[in-house]
Amino acid sequence: MDYGYQLLRHIVHQVFGNLLTAARITLVLALIPIGILLATNPGVLTGGAFAYDPTAPSDDFSGMALIGILLALLTGVICWLWAAVAWHRFVLLEEYPTGIFPAWRGSNIGNYFGNSLLIGLIMFGLGFAFGIGIALLSIGIQSEALAIFLLIGLVFGLSWVATRIGLILPAAAIGERLGIGESWRATAPVAGQIILPIFVLALASTILNQAIIVLFAETAAALPDDFFAQQQVTLSWAGTILSLIVTWLQMLLNLALMTTLYGNLIEGRQLN
């Protein structure tokens, strides 16, 4: 059986087969930054805070709203790191949550943050370099369609690279040491096969989010000067909740991909 298909099936089973435990590990942590946004600026969640109306006067964010957004971002990063480490440890070490929150593993979370930052810097450098190349090529050939195609390819390529080097994340979560080069070499035998789950997860998320926009968009105002013909969408609260659920599931599936690759390629575990 194709490795990519086995990998995809395994991560889907890992998440949906342990959905209640996943909720216990991650949902309360995910709700904390959302609660801060609800308390300070609920329009950020639905998109209403950013809706462009050329007939309405400009209305800047209040100081409290900006503080709330910054606090939600900071809290969101901490909660995401906490939840990610707890998920990896649940799968790889069978460490179950015992209370409302999963156990706080400060040193592991700190190492996870450092490794995440390292991956982020690598992705930024690659994205910046290739982005300049795409921009120059697009200016030369003057084809918006080709530019969009190349940008989509760039995003997908960066996701592939991040997955190849991302095994350092579950390693940090369980207190093991693994370098970028070791992760890259470990994933080399399956480098082509991991394209399938990356593509399917991205496609499924895109389709679901577009369906939510179609079904639950309340307004869709064009941005100033019809920039790239994009539209600013405002969702109903039902659509916002569904969008948050899709984002949560996508986060879990991406974590499961890293966890499964680590378990299979580093620890020698078999795929289901």
Image (tube, grey):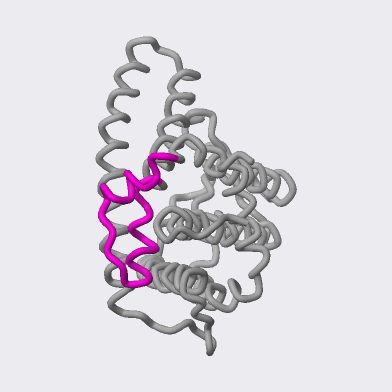
Q: Residue at the bottom extreme? A: 99
Relative to 22, is 252 above or below? above
Residue 21 image offset from top left, x and y in percent:
61, 76
Relative to 234, is 195 above or below? above
Q: Locate the N terminus and report the quarter of the image it occupies.
A: top right
| x 30%, y 29%: residue | 130
Relative to 10, is 194 above or below? above
Q: Is residue 168 magenta?
A: yes
Q: Is residue 253 left or right of residue 130?
A: right
| x 67%, y 47%: residue | 208
Instruction: Determine which quarter of the picture holds residue 62.
Output: bottom left
- What residue range appears in magenta? 164-189
| x 50%, y 19%: residue | 145
Between 54 and 22, the one lying in front of the other is 22
Q: Is residue 172 in view from this perspective?
A: yes
Residue 199 image offset from top left, x and y in percent:
55, 39
The kind of secondary structure the magenta stretch mainly shows is helix
